[in-house]
Every structure is written in structure tokens, then in C-alpha cells.
Amino acid sequence: MACLLVVDDERDIVELISRFAEHEGYTVDSAGNGAEAVALCRKNDYDLIILDIMMPGMDGFTVCKKIREEKEIPVIMLSALGAEYDKLMGFELGIDDYVVKPFSPRELMARVKAVLLRSGTDKQKNEIVIQGIRINTTAHEVFIDGEKKELTAKEYELLVYLVRNKGIALTRETILNAVWGYEYFGDNRTVDWQIKLLRGKLGQYRRCIVTLRGTGYRFDDKA
């Protein structure tokens, strides 16, 4: 599983990127300024850095230079400016991609995946195995005790989300936002209905999706 470092002085941006990255299965560390980012890179090994340019104190260009003096880590730069100078400066430093704010978190995650694949550092496993449930995340296939199950796209996304958040209490609203997206205008009954359909395809492992009365659901492989 790839480990990302998100560097931005805007806390809301860090939290947004971290939430989407963790949903994709990445582990995430964060830094609120350049000095903190450099210190973390000296101490830890990261597979990719998402780095804001405009930060007080040490800007993103300087951070990138300092990190690259010691480690060769892929970098995606963020900028609110979108100026040609920023892009040229970034690419002269050898950054791997450049994203202009405001950006789509989903597009950013697609760029992260592309950079990791190009650099050969994408460590995400293409299989998730829990008891008799096997999920091939490359082929989007699910097997229950060795038997392939035909899941709809939303059933598959829901199962992967629940499994990747194993042991965590998830509200219906959280699930709705994560799986259907923030622009979806459905209600919580959508989640309940899809959970019911998904349980019907999991056989004996339907018990792993635990209903939390008045709250939502939790995936528990020990249930």
C-alpha cells in the first residue's frame, strides 16, 4: 500500500485530499508547512508527495529542492495560480505532475495513481482477502468461498469501502458521500437498500456487515 505525504498550509485542503486518498487505500501523512515536510521526509519513506507551492516561509519549490537533494520521491505540485512560470519552474525541478486549484479530488487521485504506476512505486495490493471473501481490485471481481459473485458497480464500491474501513463505525451519511459522492441527492434509504442487496450476495459473510442501530454500519470480520 503506497504512502503519501500531503503538504499544504490550508487544513481544509489537507483533510479533503487525505480523505479521498485513504478511501483509495493509501496511507497518508500530512504537513502544514515546508520545514515540517522536509523533516518528515528525512525520517520516513514516502511513495509520493502532494505539495502546495504557495506556503508561508518555505515555498513548495524550495521544499522540493531540499527533499530531492536527499531522496528521489515523485511529486505532484498544487498551485492556486496556474501561471506558466509555476509550471515551467516545477517541471525544471523534475516534478511528475502539476494540478491547479481548485481541483477535483477524484481527478487528483487519478493523477496520483498514474504517477505511482509510471514510477513503479504503486504498492497497492490488487487483492483484498478477508476470510472467504476475495476482492480483485484490478478486475473488479468478487469471490465468495471461491465462487465468483456478480455485483453491480455500486454493490462492488460499497463492499470495497466497507472492507477498507473494517472495524470503523460508519454513518449512513458518510457511506452515502463516500460511495455515491457529495453531489448525489438521494437519502439514507439508498444505503440501507444497497446494504440489503449486498448482504444477499455475501452468503454466510453477510454477518460481517453489522447494523449499528440509529447510526449506520460497520464491517466486522469477527462478527
Image (cartoon, grey):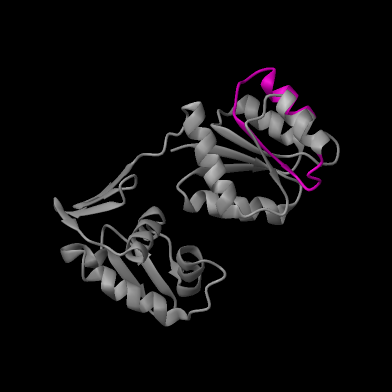
Residue lying at the far top of the rendered structure: 69
Residue at point 56%, 31% (across, down):
46
Residue 74 lies in magenta, yes or no? yes
Could you say where residue 207 lies in the image, as x and y percent from the top left?
23, 67
Could you say where residue 169 lies in the image, as x and y percent from the top left?
43, 66
Residue 40 lies in magenta, yes or no? no
Could you say where residue 194 lies in the image, as x and y percent from the top left?
34, 73
Residue at point 62%, 20% (across, down):
71
Residue at point 36%, 39% (across, down):
125
Q: Tell me if residue 12 comes above or below residue 92 in the rendering.
A: below
Q: Tell me if residue 203 comes above or below residue 75 in the rendering.
A: below
Q: Is residue 174 left or right of residue 84?
A: left
Q: Is residue 205 left or right of residue 7?
A: left
Residue lying at the far right of the rendered structure: 57
Could you say where residue 189 lies in the image, as x and y percent from the top left?
41, 82
Q: Quadrant of the N terminus?
A: top left
Q: Identify the magenta region.
A: 62-83
Q: Which image quadrant for residue 52?
A: top right
Foreground: 80 or 175? 80
